[in-house]
Image: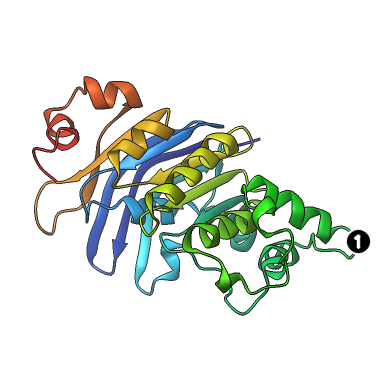
Amino acid sequence: MGKRLETSGLSAWFGSHLAIEDITLSVEPNEVTALIGPSGCGKSTFIRCLNRMHEAVPGARVEGKVLLDGEDVYGNTVDVPSLRRTVGMVFQRPNPFPTMSIRENVAAGLRLAGRGRRGHAGDLVEKSLRGAGLWDEVKDRLDRPGGSLSGGQQQRLCIARAIAIEPDVLLMDEPCSALDPISTLVIEDLMVELKSRFTILIVTHNMQQAARVSETTAFFNVGGVGEPGRLVEVGPTEKIFTKPNDERTEAYVTGRFG
């Protein structure tokens, strides 16, 4: 089952540049929460702070709190590789290991998590590919390279790899931006199915997508060039798109800016 994610006063820097400032947001378990907003408003930076990928950038730092079911993920005793298995991530462009087989791509995640024991890995690979809606398409060619799949299939393979280790939270950074409309709808249907098992947070520029898949939507914005991204408004998706509280949100969702 998914876990609750909360941030409190979260700010992040790249060197001296303040990228996001004072973000306080709750992400409810077993729901899809969408982050929307114009380019450069810090959405991707924000989600990379949630599994401590932000700190992998030289000179990057974070202030504030990120809590996973009440536990501070930036605590001194937190094992970062374990955290990144608990808070998994799917990136904008499909990134399977191109020379590894389809089977090996999924099993790679299992081995890193210490779950790829002989006799069990095959079952877990099938379960993960089924969970990603890909099994029926690839079951007869599991030994072919992951790079031989179509773009949409590669993205589902990456989702299978991410969910194989049973994370509590799945972060998705514009997972459909490189895909055709049919593949996009397949991924959207998959998100709706997966939320019964995981907490899902998706960054998207596609507002129709946010409206289709999410229960909650958060709108990020920047005040001007060089200013940090800030959370303007968060609420039930239907309300954000039909009757937002903030005029900046209304201007964005109606296409008057951004």
Q: Which residue is mark 1?
A: 119
Look at the numbered disc 1 and give the secondary structure of its residue.
Answer: loop
Q: Residue at x 46, y 51 (%)?
A: 183
Q: Residue furthest bottom?
A: 99
Q: Amino acid at mark 1?
A: Gly
Residue 120, percent across and down? 87, 57
- The quadrant of the image that shows the N terminus is top right
The residue that appears at 86% across and 63% down in the rendered structure is 117
Label 1 neighbour load within 10 Å: few <14, some 14-19, many 20+? few
- Name the residue rendered at 23%, 58% in the picture: 18
Residue 64 image position (x, y, % from top left) = 38, 47
Residue 115 or residue 182, whichever sits in front: 182
Q: Look at 37% across and 62% down and name the residue there.
A: 61
Q: Please indicate, yes or no, whether residue 57 appears anywhere in the rendered image.
A: yes
Q: Is residue 236 visible?
A: no
Residue sitting nearer the eye, 66 or 153: 153
Quadrant of the rendered image containing residue 122: bottom right
In the displayed structure, 41 sits above or below 15; it is above
Q: Quadrant of residue 209?
A: top left
Residue ranking furthest to the right: 119
Residue 94: percent from left, percent from top: 48, 64
Looking at the image, what colour scheme do you see?
Answer: rainbow
Say whether residue 55 is left or right of residue 240: right
- Left or right: 37 in relation to 192: left
